[in-house]
Amino acid sequence: MFSKFGFLASAEAGASPVIPKPAEIAVGFIAFGILFLLIRARAVPRFEKAYKDRTEAIEGGLERAEVAQREAAEALQMYKAQLADARGEAAKLREEARAEGSVILEQMRTTAQEEATRITASARTSIEAERQVAFNSLLNEVGALATELASRIVGESLDDVARQSRVVERFLEEVEKSK
């Protein structure tokens, strides 16, 4: 069993290559101290500066991002407000156009009704005038026919205009009475 732990037995017997001598330990501590002081004096401030710069850059980036985010939120609010105003304005314009269209439509209806009334009145006047002309023409023709017929029946000429008128008037009165 001693063979397994043979290196321990040899260490007890003399100088061990694993355990350092006290002079080497002192030189190691001094070298470590000098190296520690150099690193602390030269490298650590540079690391600290780089760390500080990086921290400031990150914080500055975060602040810029927050500012940009606030500006974007303000722009979004402004956009939404403008959009709402535009929608309100569009609705107002549509309402005004509808109202204006209704007024124009009513004016057109009124104008059309007035025009129809005027045309109807004009047509009635024209028809009445034509009826009167036709009645007068018919009256003259009936009078002429009646005079001619009466001349044939009576056997004498009724060329006299006054006499002709009296005969026609009597004839028409008789016709009206018979109805």
Image: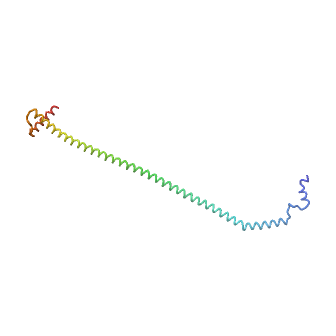
Figure coloring? rainbow
Residue 149 is left or right of residue 13, and the answer is left
Spot occupied by residue 163 in the image (x, y as percentages of width and height): 9, 38
Mark count:
0
Q: Which residue is at a point 90% across and 58% down the rendered structure image? A: 10
Q: Is 71 placed above or below 178 here?
A: below
Question: Looking at this view, is 51 or 154 the one in front?
Answer: 154
Placement of 178 over or under 32, stated as above or below: above
5 sits to left or right of 99: right
Q: Nearer the viewer, residue 177 or 8?
A: 177
Residue 5, given in percent of the width and then of the height, sits at 89, 54
Tell me where residue 137 sits by quadrant.
top left
* Above or below: residue 29 compared with residue 102: below
- Front one among 3 and 100: 100
Image quarter (top left, top right, bottom left or bottom right) of the C terminus: top left
Residue that lies at the very extreme toward the left in this rendered image: 156
Residue 117: horizontal and vertical position, in percent?
28, 44
Left or right placement of residue 85 versus residue 30 in this view: left
* Residue at horizontal 21 percent and vertical 42 percent from the top: 130
Picture quadrant of residue 171: top left
Q: Residue at x 16, y 38 (%)?
A: 141
Where residue 134 sits in the image (x, y, percent)? Answer: 19, 40
Image quarter for residue 132? top left
| Image side of residue 100 versus residue 16, left or right | left
Q: Is residue 32 above or below residue 4?
A: below
